[in-house]
Image: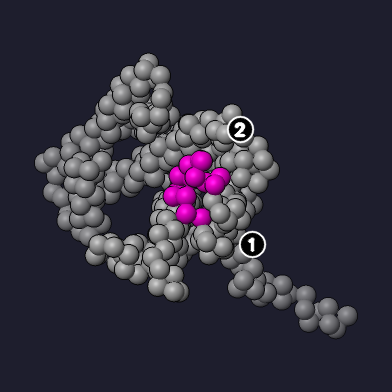
Amino acid sequence: MAYAADHAADHHDHKPNPFWRWFGSTNHKDIGTLYLVFSVITGIIGAALSVVMRMELSDPGVEFLVKENGDPNGHFWNTIITAHGVIMIFFVVMPALIGGFGNWFVPLMIGAPDMAFPRMNNISFWLLVPALAFGILSAVVGGGAGTGWTFYPPLSVMQPDKMSVSFAIFALHMAGASSIMGAINFVTTIIRMRAPGMGFFRMPVFVWTAWAAQTLQLIGLPALTGGAIMLLFDLSFGTSFFRPEGGGDPVLYQHFFWFYSHPAVYVMVLPVFGIFSELITVYSRKPLFGYKFVALASFIITFLGLIVWVHHMFYTGTPQWMRNLVMITTMLIAVPTGVKVFAWLGTSWGAKIRLTTPMLFVLGGLVNFIFGG
């Protein structure tokens, strides 16, 4: 009784173990922070690989990528390219922009207490850790996966070390599962958990762009996942989905891959457009010019982004009607992006812009996008 009396009121003083505080957290801000920290760590790994690539390209011939006996090792170069591409796209840019900034700001911007599925949110982050481990293993096991980040067959199914390519496919599967769960969570949160009075056309533009990007993820990722599973079966179980010698079609894999991987460009850039819109309005001290057009332009990009993938495959024997269609949609997708650029110019026109560091980054990004995007 004395023990119970002494400890009856101390339950408020117990704090979670620091490990479980982060490992088991379902708070959207905590998970957003985890995504950002993860992206910084993987960004360092990806940047280190980039430095090695640039060092190798500094002089003609093989300079640094050599075997122990001094022979040139061109396969090692292919392995570095593969690891760099996979890490930078699936483990740096997407986790930072969607998982990091999205988790932090979308619930706050729509007045939601948290994400719709907090535990799924936690799982979707922690799936990235073993996915990254598989990705790193794919570069160090055996000779490493030297297929390039596209994993095109028949090269990918003819690798001398099948285990390394299998690890790379496992990494893509787990990262894809993480992204699909995150997309379900974001779309549900935005549609169902807005605060009373928060209509769709009262949401900040960043929420619109996150919604559009996650819709692309939901539609496009299953195609890549299915193609990767078929590739794994060709690699390890003797099937011939993509093996020409068994009646398979390597071009079919390219359709699976680019159906998602070209829209992935918009998955990465749409949240950036949302950030641009928010920062320009803040530092121009004006509401966004053409708000509704900017919001709807995000979903026009989503729609058109799903029907332009064949422009990566003009020389692969695709039908002429398909090439003509994709040529038109590829040009059309510049229209909604142009709407956004003109809206930003209209917002800035006549404004007393404060050239703070964030605004300077926005201006630099805009110049880069207009000339190179």
Amino acid type shown at disc 2: Gly
Q: Is residue 352 above or below residue 296?
A: below
Name the secondary structure under disc 1. loop
Q: Considering the image in quadrants, where does the C terminus appear?
A: top left
Q: Is residue 47 above or below residue 369?
A: below
In this view, the residue in front, 304 or 151, is 151
Question: Dot 2, crowdedness within 10 Å: few (<14), some or many (≥20)?
Answer: few
For disc 1, the marked residue is 24
Identity of the residue drawn at 53% across and 38% down: 224
Label 2: state its secondary structure. Answer: helix
Is residue 166 positioned above or below 198 on the image? below
Residue 108 visible in the current orientation: no
Residue 177: x and y in percent read: 59, 46
Q: In the image shown, does 181 or 115 lie closer to the viewer?
A: 181
How is this picture coloured?
one colour
Quarter occupied by residue 44: bottom left
The answer to whether residue 313 is magenta is no
Report the residue at 53% width, 64% height from top. Answer: 140
Q: Magenta residues, as a range?
A: 145-158
C-alpha span from label 2 to label 1 = 47 Å
The picture places residue 231, in percent across and down from the top left corner, at 58, 41
Mark 1 residue crowding within 10 angstroms, few (<14) / some (14–19) / many (20+): some
